[in-house]
Amino acid sequence: METELFEIRNHLFAHAPFRNLPKEVVDSIVPHIQVAYFQAGTMIVEKGQEATDLYVIRKGAVEIFRSSGELLTRMGEGECFGQFALMRKKKVRYPAKAIEDTLAYLIPDEQFQLLCDEHDRFADFMEEDHSTRLQNAMEYTGQQSRNPLMFSKLRTLLHSEIITARPSVSLREAALTMTRNRVSSLVLISETDQENPIAGLITDRDLRKRAIAKGLDLSTPVSEIMSRDIVTHQAGDFAFEAMLTMMRYNLHHLPILDNETPIGVITVSDLMQYASYGSVFIVGDIYRQKTVEDLVSMAGSIRQLFIQLISEDANSHTIGAALSRIAVSISQRLLQLGEKQLGPPPVPYCLVVLGAMARDELTLVTDQDNAFVLDDSFTPDLHDAYFKELARFLSDGLDRCGFPYCRGDIMATNPQWRQPLSVWKSYFSGWIDDPKPEALLHASIFFDLEGIYGETGFAKVLKNLIREKAKDNTRFLACLARNALMRKPPLGFFRKFVLEPDGEYKNTFNLKRRGTAPISDLARVHALACGATKINTENRLDQIKQTTLLAEGVGDDLLDALELISMVRIRHQARQVESGKIPDNNVRPERLSSFERRHLKDAFKVVAQAQSFLRYRYNAHPGMQVSKTPGSGTGKK
C-alpha cells in the first residue's frame, strides 16, 4: 500500500466509527478517498447544494451551521460531517465552514452507503448526534450493572402478606398478633382516614422500650406508643430508593403501598441480600457511638463503602446520597454529643447544611459547609457563648471525621453564619433584591440548604422565602445565570479537552468545577425560575422537565451528561483511594478509557449547549456583574 494510503487508513482506524470496522473493509474504501484542502474562512459545503461525500477531518477545524445560520457545533480532527445529507435527500442541510486551514478526507457516497448497508454499528453512529450517543452510552453502562439493588422493584422483595391492626387494640393483642404471625412490626390502619390509611407503626423494639420497660398496663391501647407520621414507599419504587430513605431517617421498617393500600413492610434484613446494605448499618452504628473518637474510627468504613458501591455498579445518585446520609448522621450525632457535654441549648436552633451535602451529592472530595439558624429569642450576650462553643465542637468533630474545614469559612463557627431566623431572612431578601457579586457568591452556596437537626422548620421557612422571592425577580435570575456561566466545560472549539496550563494540576481538567458544577449551577437557576421544590440536581432536572423552560429532550440529555461525568469523577477518586493516594477531582485525559474520553466530549457538548440557552433565556449578557465562583482557584473544592 502506498505511503499516503497507509496514512489515511491509520487515521481512520484511530477514530470512531472506523475503528470498529474490519481491517479489510477499511482497506477497501481507502483507494476511493479524495484528499481536499480548505483555506480558513472558506465554505466547504453550502446549504442546498448536492451532497456527494462524507467529510472526515484530518487536520484543522470546521464550524457547522443550522439552516437558520445559527452555529450548531464545531468539529476537529477525526470527526465526520455531511452524513445527514447523504442519508436523506442528497441536499446539504447544514452548511460547513473552515475556521482553520483544514485538510479533509472525502469518502464518496457510494462507499458510504455500502458501509451503512453492511455494518449496522457504522450506520447507527452516523445516524446519531452527540446527545443520542451519550444516551446510548448511559443505557449501555446501566445494562452492565451487576447489583440488583439498582433495578429490583420493592414489590419483588415482599414475600408475605402485610399484618395490620387498628390503633385501638391493646398492647397484649398487638404482641400476640406479631408473635402468631412471626413479624417484627405491626402496621396500624386508621379507622377514619381513607386518604392516609396508615395511622402508625409499632415494632417489637417499641413494645420492649416504650411499654414493658415503662411498666405500662397490657390493656393500654397501642396508639399510646405507636410511631406516627410514617414514611412509606410505593411498590413500584426501586430497592436502592428504599435503602436511601432508611438511611435518611434511620429506619429499620418501611411500609410499602400500592397506591394508597398498604401491602407489606420492608426491613433492613430484606436488603441484606445486597452487599450495599452495609450503608444502612453504618448509619445505625453512627448513632451508637459514645465519643468523637468513636466516630473518627468509622472513617475507614465510609471509604470502604464508597469502593464497595462502585464495585457493585451503583449509580452516582445512590453513591452521593449514601455518603451524604452518612455525613448528615455524623453531624447529628456530633451535636447530640455536644449538647450532652455543654448542656441543653438556651434557645431553639437548627443546623443547616449547604451545597453538595444538602443536595445529596457528596463524594470523597468534600469539605463542610454549615450554619446555625437560631430562634428569634436569641440574645447574643446571653446565648452566643454556648452556640459558639457548640459550633466549634461540631466543626472540629467533622474535620476529624474526614470533612475538612471550609476554606471559605462557611461554617457555624463564623458568627456571620450563626444568626437568628429574622437575620437570615434579611440575608436572603438582600441577596435576591440587590444581586451584587458577593450576594451572588452567597446565593450559589446558601440557596442549596437543608435543615438536618433541631428546629428544621426554620430551614423550611427560608426555602419558602427563596422560592417565592426569586422566581419573579428577573434581574436576580439574570445575574445568577450570568454567574453560572463562569464555570464552563473543558471542551475547546475543536472538541479537544482544555487542560490546566500550569501549577499542581497541570495537564488535567477538573470534573467537578468544569463538569458537574456547571450542571448544578444551571439547574439551580431554572429551578428558582419555576419555583421547583427539589434540591438534588437530578431531582431538580426532573421537575424542570415538567415545565416549558427546556426544549423537549434537553432535560434528559442533561441527566445523562450529569450521570456520565459524575461516574467518571467517582471512579477516578476510587482508583486514587485504592492506590493509596489522596482523592481529588482532577483527571488526565490519557488515563481515561477511550469510552470515557469519547462520551465525556458528548456530555460536555450537552452542557455547553445548555449554557448557551441559559444565557439566551435569562438575558445574561456579558456586561453583567458576576462573582468569582467558590472554589474556582483550586482543584479540590
Image (tube, grey):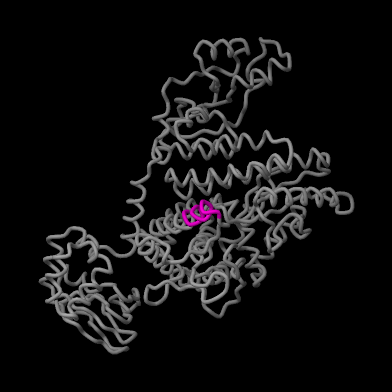
Q: Is residue 66 left or right of residue 616?
A: left
The x, y position of residue 606, in whole percent, is 40, 65
> Which image quadrant is residue 168 in?
top right
Q: Is residue 31 above or below residue 512?
A: below
Magenta segment boundaries in residue numbering: 571-580
Is 271 inside the magenta-drawn segment? no
Q: Is residue 127 left or right of residue 451?
A: left
Q: Is residue 90 above or below residue 238?
A: below
Q: How many marks?
A: 0
Residues 274 and 203: in front is 274
Q: Is residue 436 left or right of residue 44?
A: right
Majority secondary structure in the magenta region? helix
The x, y position of residue 6, in whole percent, is 19, 76
The x, y position of residue 239, in whole percent, is 45, 36
| Quadrant location of the N terminus in the rendered image | bottom left
Residue 423 appears in view: yes
| Quadrant location of the C terminus in the rendered image | bottom right
> Which image quadrant is residue 564 in?
bottom left
Q: Is residue 192 above or below residue 473?
A: above
Residue 191 appears in view: no
Q: Is residue 486 above or below residue 463?
A: below
The x, y position of residue 147, in whole percent, is 40, 40
Residue lying at 31% horizontally and 60% vertically, measured from the top left? 133
Q: Is residue 156 left or right of residue 482?
A: left
Residue lying at 69% horizontally and 20% vertically, measured from the top left? 210
Residue lying at 59% horizontally and 69% vertically, measured from the top left? 632
> Which image quadrant is residue 48 in?
bottom left
